[in-house]
Image (cartoon, grey):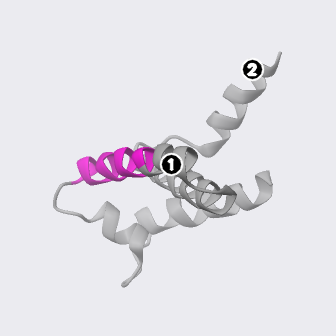
Amino acid sequence: MADVLDEVYAVIADRKVNPKEGSYTTSLYNHRKGIDKVLEKIGEESTELIIAAKNGGEKEIVSECADLFFHAMVLLAAKDIPFEKIKEEFERRRK
């Protein structure tokens, strides 16, 4: 599981330094609202996850959770925070 998350984060981080035309991630980085657009998406996806948890089934919950994770990863990359830091934090909390 961590491997696929590492791969997704690597693509997200790469889009920041190597924008790709037509890429959704690139569009977030280049949005006129800047980081505020990413933060809006995190808020939107959080709300959608809450609604899915209340009213939806497993498929909807998993989908919305993945959307939230994705946008959180975009935020990390936008702020130059390596994904490894999140894994380290979970490791620290596990002890």
Q: Residue 1's spot in the image, x, y percent?
A: 80, 55
Type of secondary structure dominating the magenta stretch: helix
Q: How many marks?
A: 2
- Looking at the rendered image, the quarter that the C terminus falls into is top right
Highlighted range, magenta:
34-47
Which residue has dot 2 on it? 92
Q: Extreme top residue here?
A: 95
Q: Earlier in the sequence, mark 2 or mark 1?
A: 1
Cα gap from disc 2 to disc 1, whole angstroms: 26 Å
Which tag is nearer the camera, tag 2 or tag 1? 1
Dot 1 amino acid type:
Leu
The residue sitting at 32% across, 45% down in the picture is 39
Any magenta on residue 41? Answer: yes
Q: Residue 49's spot in the image, x, y percent?
A: 50, 48
Q: Extreme left residue here?
A: 32
Q: Residue 91's spot in the image, x, y percent?
A: 77, 27
Pick whichever, 36 or 44, lies toward us: 44
Any magenta on residue 50? Answer: no
Which residue has dot 1 on it? 49
Q: Is residue 50 left or right of residue 10?
A: left
Q: Residue 17's spot in the image, x, y percent?
A: 43, 65
